[in-house]
Amino acid sequence: MSKKFYELTPDDRLLELSLNEQTRQALSNRQSAVNAQLVENYISDFRVPIGVVHDILVDGKRYSVPMAVEEPSVIAAANNGVKMLSDSVRVKMSRMAMIGQMMFSNAVDLSSFILTHRNEIFEIAKRAKPSIYQRGGGLLDFKIRKVSENETSLDFIIDTKDAMGANIVNTIMEAELVLFEQFKPLGVILSNYATNQLVTVSAAVEFKQVGGFEVAKKIVSLNHFSKNDPYRAVTENKGIFNGISAVVLATGNDWRAVEASGHAYASRNGQYQGLATWTIVDNKLHGELTLPISVGTVGGAISAMPDAKQALSIIGNVGADDLRGIILSVGLAQNLAALKAIASGGIQRGHMRMQYRALAMQVGAHSDEVIQVVSHLIKLKQVDASIAEKVLMEIRNESKN
Ligand SMILES: CC(C)(COP(=O)([O-])OP(=O)([O-])OC[C@H]1O[C@@H](n2cnc3c(N)ncnc32)[C@H](O)[C@@H]1OP(=O)([O-])[O-])[C@@H](O)C(=O)NCCC(=O)NCCSC(=O)C[C@@](C)(O)CC(=O)[O-]
Ligand SMILES: NC(=O)C1=CN([C@@H]2O[C@H](COP(=O)(O)OP(=O)(O)OC[C@H]3O[C@@H](n4cnc5c(N)ncnc54)[C@H](O)[C@@H]3O)[C@@H](O)[C@H]2O)C=CC1
């Protein structure tokens, strides 16, 4: 009997796909035994460049922070933002915990049930995941939240220490189900809306760092625009996630969880708004960014992927709480760089200079030709793919003669 596609080896799966020999070989060469265990129907690795934010000062400590991102100018902008922040970014957070939901429709007398079964609920959690209790975490509290006339969520607040905690929470939640059988729960699952993991970073920037008072005022007005216009807010937040998601990805964390939670938080007032807030306070440009952020430094893919562990070792020996503050600080720096660029001459100037490297590759330049193509393109007023191609051809013709 022939095997199902998922029962084949990675190389046999590649043979099943209609690929030319060169592509098949390239994909086969990029396979790794570890990653083959992480996902299903594995065929190869997809490499994303990783660079660093060099020397960011967060709560008085200096870090180098890895960023995995495919977009040119993002890492340069993060470094530029860090340079403008110059002073230490301050971080505020309360005790971090995940939320697990048990969902009910038409549950009658649930409040009195949880009051009389309080100890049992805690005992079940302890038995379900003793290792997290040994590390000082576990179930902290639970409370009822009315969602609609007949729908109720019983929210479990669980400290997952240095793990992101999705599996820890789901294990505890599923163990709790039996006790609530009579209320016929719809199901249990963690919530990615991590409102018990709110972190705030803030920084004060001298006007001269952004090019003077007029630029600072423009940054404040631009940012204010994102509080009233979702079209601008989505773009400004995309810029913030340029930084946040790149660090989340490099450290092996779940960027879908962080982004979904961040965008929900951006809509908490009933309208989608810019996540950061820039104001002028005491003759300085003051920036603040608050976000629910659930990440870990152990567990999940982090402990399985050498790439993630190596990336984390660039930051140093940090726990999940430090990592949250560092990730958000990169987000704030990224936001400042983008706003400063828009407020003083436009994003294209700085961004395109870096984009030209990708453009040169796109039109077929070999790595030893890229610098030459870029140095020609920088001098031009207008650049697009056909112009880049023409420049490449001219360079090749010149080197033949
Ligand atoms: C692109 C820059 C940094 C040029 O910046 P610049 O001021 O034109 O050039 P510079 O050579 O004076 O560099 C300033 C600093 O940038 C850093 N820097 C400079 N070059 C490098 C490099 N090669 N590698 C690493 N770091 C670099 C470095 O820190 C440097 O300081 P130095 O160390 O030289 O004293 C600036 O124009 C910038 O920050 N632009 C913002 C670009 C950006 O945000 N790109 C993301 C893509 S656009 C987007 O996706 C989101 C957005 C922008 O739409 C969000 C929004 O609308 O809010
Ligand atoms: N909705 C979602 O976001 C969902 C996400 N996931 C995935 O779950 C994964 C994360 O699950 P986790 O529970 O974090 O990982 P995990 O299942 O690997 O649990 C963490 C383990 O690390 C151990 N550990 C060692 N040192 C620790 C420390 N200092 N602090 C805390 N725990 C420590 C814990 O005892 C635990 O067994 C991610 O890969 C995520 O993508 C899974 C289900 C749903």
Image (cartoon, rainbow, N blue to C red):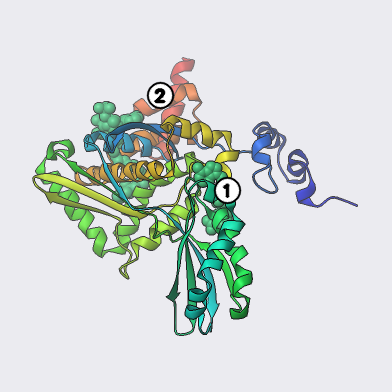
Amino acid at dot 1: Ser
Residue beneath disc 2: 371
Residue closer to the observer: 398 or 96: 96
* Residue at position x 64%, y 44% in the image: 38
Find residue 76 and report its image quarter: top left
- Work out whether residue 378 can be spotted: no
Amino acid at dot 2: Ile
Q: Is residue 48 shown left or right of residue 262?
A: right
Residue beneath disc 1: 131
Q: Picture coordinates of residue 129 (x, y %)?
A: 59, 54
Taking the view exactly as shown, the residue that stands out farthest to the right is 1
Question: Which element carries disc 2, helix, strand or loop?
Answer: helix
Ligand 2 contact, mark 1 (Cβ < 8 Å): yes
Q: CA distance from mark 2 to mark 1?
A: 53 Å
* Image vertical order of residue 174 relative to residue 151, above or below: above
Residue closer to the observer: 384 or 63: 63
Q: Is residue 341 shown left or right of residue 370?
A: left
Question: Which element carries disc 1, helix, strand or loop?
Answer: helix
Q: Which quadrant contains ligand 1? A: top left
* Residue at position x 10%, y 43% in the image: 213
* Image vertical order of residue 123 relative to residue 153, above or below: above
Category of crowding for the residue at label 2, using alpha-carbon neighbours closer than 10 angstroms: few (below 14), some (14–19), many (at least 20): some
- Work out whether residue 7 can be spotted: yes
Q: Picture coordinates of residue 219 (x, y %)?
A: 19, 49
Residue closer to the observer: 77 or 391: 77
Ligand 1 contact, mark 2 (Cβ < 8 Å): no
Q: Picture coordinates of residue 104 (x, y %)?
A: 54, 77
